[in-house]
């Protein structure tokens, strides 16, 4: 399925580019900003329209690239909807800035915050739902990363409210790392997907790939 592999490879390239841009965005900001106590959005607002915002947009685009291939792989409509919500949340957070650190939140900052919340929660749930259709070793990775992401999201919520923002920057960055890894597992699985070099019969393209692989693999001893 060359279309599926190409989508996976293109998405992997986008994910890698987004990661590089995010790192560059952290290197270019003032030394007065602490990655332990300030969020990525706090860094991005100091350089509006800069590389961090671009990284978010690239990551959203990389996710959208995967959607047709995931549909062919048998992903549910709910999983696709959640991935769209993740992408939309990323784009909204990139376009609508938060407030400068230390300033009271305005309407734009609240919109930015809740767009980020939607994105952070949508992706791990989508990853859990994708475990079954993608199957194999990817299923275990996706479920594990989904659970880790949800736990880290809970830690970030605790830090933002009762925790008085204790290490909120660290919690968010580890959360982002887990979620980007989850997305990379999805893309890598699609990029390396082969069904034993066998042509897939008409009508099988919408079935879970793990199921197709079992049916086209010759029985032992045949």
Image (spheres, rainbow, N blue to C red):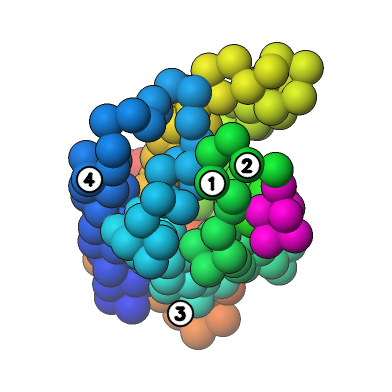
Q: Residue 108 placed where, x, y %?
A: 68, 61
User: First in sequence: mark 4 or mark 1?
Assistant: 4
Q: CA distance from mark 1 to mark 3?
A: 56 Å
Q: Which residue is mark 4?
A: 28
Task: Quote the CA–CA distance across marks 2 and 4.
Answer: 22 Å
Q: Give the SS element for disc 2.
A: loop
Position of the N terminus by quadrant: bottom left
Tell me the CA gap for discs 4 and 1: 17 Å
Q: To which quarter of the image does residue 220 belong?
A: top left
**Mark 1 or mark 3, which has the lower sequence index?**
1
Whole-number angstrom distance, CA of label 1 to CA of label 2: 6 Å
| C-alpha span from label 4 to label 3 | 52 Å
Q: In this view of the protein, which residue sits in the foreground, 18 or 46?
A: 46
Q: Main secondary structure of the magenta part?
A: helix
Q: Read off the residue under disc 1.
A: 100
Please tell me whether mark 2 or mark 4 is closer to you in this view: 2
Mark 3 — residue?
A: 201
Sequence order check, earlier mark of 4 and 3: 4
The x and y percentages for residue 188 are: 32, 52
Q: Residues within 10 Å of mark 3 (few under 14, many from 20)?
A: few
Q: Mark 1, mark 3: which one is toward the viewer?
A: 1
Circles 3 and 2, Cβ within 8 Å, touching? The answer is no
Task: Please give the name of the residue rendered at 28% of the width and 68% of the height, measured from the top-left corner.
Answer: 10
**Image coordinates for residue 16, horizontal then vertical, percent:** 25, 53
Part of the protein shown in magenta: 105-111
């Amino acid at each position: 399925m060359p279309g599926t592999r190409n989508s996976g490879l293109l998405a992997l390239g986008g994910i890698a580019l987004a990661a590089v841009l995010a790192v560059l965005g952290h290197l270019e900001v003032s030394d007065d900003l602490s990655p332990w106590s300030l969020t990525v959005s706090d860094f991005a607002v100091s350089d509006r329209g800069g590389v961090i915002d671009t990284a978010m947009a690239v990551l959203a685009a990389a996710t959208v690239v995967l959607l047709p291939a995931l549909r062919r792989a048998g992903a549910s409509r709910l999983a696709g909807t959640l991935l769209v919500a993740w992408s939309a949340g990323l784009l909204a957070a990139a376009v609508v800035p938060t407030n400068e650190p230390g300033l009271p939140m305005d309407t734009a900052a609240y919109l930015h915050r809740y767009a980020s919340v939607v994105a952070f929660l949508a992706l791990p749930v989508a990853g859990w739902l994708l475990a079954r259709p993608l199957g194999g070793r990817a299923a275990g990775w996706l479920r594990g990363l989904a659970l880790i992401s949800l736990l880290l999201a809970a830690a970030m919520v605790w830090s933002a409210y009762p925790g008085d923002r204790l290490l909120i920057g660290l919690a968010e960055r580890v959360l982002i790392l887990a979620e980007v890894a989850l997305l990379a597992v999805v893309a890598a699985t699609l990029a390396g997907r082969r069904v034993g070099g066998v042509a897939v019969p008409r009508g099988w393209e919408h079935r879970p790939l793990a199921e197709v692989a079992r049916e086209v693999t010759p029985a032992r001893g045949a």
